[in-house]
Image: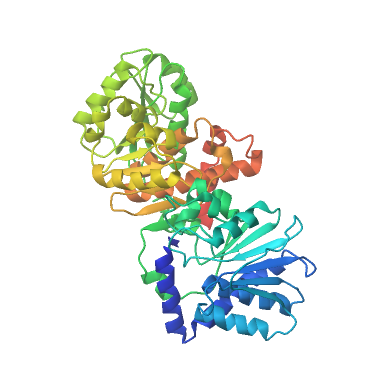
Amino acid sequence: MKIFTNEALKQIDSATIESEGITELDLMERAASAVAYEIISRWRSTKRMIIFAGPGNNGGDALAVARMLYEQGYRPEVYLFNIRSSHLSHCCSANRERLLNMGDIDFTEIVDNFTPPELGENDVVIDGLFGSGLHSPLKGGYTALVQYINNSEAFIVSIDMPSGLLGEWNEGNDRRNIIRADLTLTFASKRLSFFFSENAEFIGHCIVLDIELSPKAIMTTTTDYYLIEKEDVGEKMQPLDPFISKYDNGTLFLVAGSYGMMGAAILACKGAQRIGVGLVTVHGPASANTIMQTSCPEALFEADSSDICTTAINAKHRFSVIALGPGIGTSDETIDAVDHFLKNYRKPCLLDADALNCIAARHMLLRSIPRGSIITPHAVEFDRLFGRNVTDEERFKRAINVSKTHNITIVLKGHYTMIVRPDGKVYINSSGNPGMATAGSGDVLTGIISGLIAKGYSPDDSVWMGVYIHGLAGDLAAAKVGEHSLIATDIVNNIGPALVDIMRH
């Protein structure tokens, strides 16, 4: 699914109006109907509802919702802010007249001073002050109103966007002046800012409402942002050729593990095997031979000259892909080995975990990462490599620049794992759950992504497919053992069921 900017959604709205031969007011009626349905499905008509409407089209949505609620027996209290009298948008003005024509409606229009209504924990506030049309942070009297609403104990429903939150970038925005919604009812698609953790407190539970925008306009409108969904992965998955051999399924050279951290190697290896790699060769310390042969009997093991860590990375055969990092540690010998490998291996590879920490110890190695490679850092590892970031938005922007500068794909792991490509395209994952924030989860992901590349999927596709499959396996595992009890082995054990689910879907 495409994730559109506010400006792109405005263009799609216009295209829908033109293609269907309707008016902007008709489309607003469609949106308001979807919002009213969600509200009616949650609360009885006896519930006290206070609607705050701004002077723009978001206010027009709110006034249309108020009318529809009134028609269904609700008695909303409506406050329309028209501080600069006669400056309402066309649609807001039209819905104002429609609402007033209902007759006995509790309606107040604010043109100068405002005494806010008393709000309590049993009330529902519907926020229709400012939606996607807002282009700069809130200021003036609206900031006091937002803070007043936030300080109440009322349940807050925001239409389209929590007022004060911008659709893409909120750097410099005063967080005190953003509505903290409990429920956000947005249209067509989530906005980019919804995926940054620092904005979660404003959005609450988010529902995307389908208001039947033009499919052609959605298809032809360009964007750099995409949400990965099950059907996207299903369309790419290929059935197995009945005459295939293990070599046709690809070979993976996995540099992983060190003394006391062989679990990382096992999990990465099993992740690759469960995704269907034909043959995995694991390189690790010599002392781990028995551990690997016992835990992963289907894999080959190549022993390092050291008993405790990796001191040399030399692939003796031609492999489909090389992945390194899970559990290798950051000893001087291992950093030297990673240094030598990156300066002499020029094909794309996958770098995870301690491989990234080794690079962070020698920042000049960033220049030696082969073009087209994939790195899979979580937030802390990313900041070690590229500098501290205060917010997800800041880290995301930096990832876009780094990806282009070094021509690498960055898998920025988190609640919404974001895949940033050198061409500027960004893929955001929709699967997964908080229980996956557990030791070894990232090692499994390394195995899945590198395994898909080994099987012959393009590196670009392998990354976003792998991230989704990993998250779905975690969701299936959580359904069985619960999020609190989830461990990385559970994710491995549900890769197969995840693939079955995707193919069936």
Question: Residue 408: x percent and y percent?
Answer: 29, 43
Residue toward you, 140 or 28: 140
Say which quarter of the image contains residue 412: top left
To which quarter of the image does residue 7 belong? Answer: bottom left
> Does 401 appear above or below 158?
above
Q: Quadrant of residue 60?
A: bottom right
Q: Residue at x 30, y 21 (%)?
A: 335
- As drawn, 272 above or below 331: below
Q: Nearer the viewer, residue 77 or 299?
A: 77
Residue 97 can be seen in this image:
yes
For the residue pair 160 and 421, the one nearer the viewer reads as 160
Q: Is residue 456 visible?
A: no
Please identify the residue farthest to the right as the structure is shown.
46
Q: Quadrant of the N terminus?
A: bottom left
Residue 350 location in percent, x, y? Answer: 33, 37
Image x and y of residue 314, in percent: 25, 25
> Where is residue 252 drawn, in percent x and y?
34, 35
Question: Position of 489 compared to 14: left or right?
Answer: right
The mark total stands at 0
